[in-house]
Image (cartoon, rainbow, N blue to C red):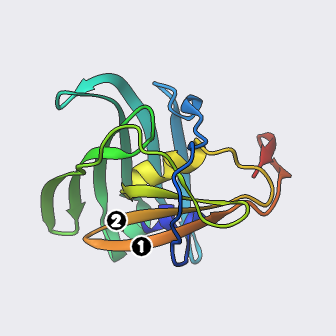
Amino acid sequence: MVLLISLTCTLHAQRKSEVSQSPFNAAAYRVGERLTYNVSFSQFVSAAHVELFVAGRGTFFNREGIQLRAHAETTGVINVALFAINDDYTTYVDPATGLPFRAQQRVREANRTSDSASDHNQPAGIAALPSQAGTESFPGTSDLLSALYRVRALPLVDGASYFITVRNAGDEYQAEVRVTGHQVFKTGVGSFSTI
């Protein structure tokens, strides 16, 4: 899951002021959508496989929510010789804000397996906090999975900057997401407009 935080985050101090309306695009949470990544590491072209998906929308733990799931698994030589990972993550988020209210994980690494769950006691409908010109801070704390989807739900216009508090393995980080530009990226399977 370190991959997820390294995709978009830079440590930065969070600044808070008056509450304003949060920009939020609920279309980032399309039930059934799957995002699949092959991860390379050093000289290993295929070191791991990561899949994220929106599993459902409904009532979970007596609260309306969206169920997000992720699976991360090392493959090939990495899995056999270096470090075996086969982890599953489930996070339930508020459909109006993207903030998690429950997170569960099953970690299977090398010779150990652990299950854990945590409740995020965050009220529904929390708005953003403006920080400085062109930036916004989001109250509440996200786990890595909900933070990734929350970033996708933002209006990612050139020059925008967002601050999100992310908790992972008991540590809390202040993450800054900056949009530096848009670009068309050409691959063997086609061209894609990227941010």
Name the image quarter holding residue 169.
Answer: bottom left
**Apparent side of residue 141 relative to residue 129 in the rendered image (left or right):** left
Residue at 58 percent across and 68 percent down: it is 176
Q: Classify mark 1: helix, strand or loop.
A: strand
Image coords of residue 24 (percent x, y):
58, 38
Q: Are marks 2 and 1 in contact (CB under 8 Å)?
A: yes
Q: Classify mark 2: helix, strand or loop.
A: strand
**Image position of 110 with respect to 147: above or below:** below
Question: Alpha carbon of mark 2 to alpha carbon of mark 1: how far?
Answer: 6 Å
| Amino acid under disc 2 | Arg
Mark 2 sits on what residue? 167
Residue 81, numbered label:
none
Residue 173, numbered label:
1
Tell me which label, 2 or 1, sits earlier in the chain.
Answer: 2
Q: Quadrant of the N terminus?
A: bottom left
Residue at 43 percent across and 56 percent down: it is 139
Front position in the image: 108 or 115: 115
| Amino acid under disc 1 | Tyr
Residue at 61 percent across and 42 percent down: it is 23
Residue 62 in view in this figure: yes
Q: Can you name the residue that lies furthest to the top here?
A: 58
Disc 1 residue crowd, few under 14, some 14–19, many 20+, Cα 10 Å: some
**Image position of 161 with respect to 98: above or below:** below
Image coords of residue 84 (percent x, y):
30, 66
Image coords of residue 15 (percent x, y):
53, 71
**Apparent side of residue 187 relative to residue 49 in the rendered image (left or right):** right
**Image position of 52 with respect to 2: above or below:** above
Residue at 36 percent across and 41 percent down: it is 69
**Image position of 37 with respect to 3: above or below:** above
Image coords of residue 119 (percent x, y):
19, 50
Q: How many marks?
A: 2
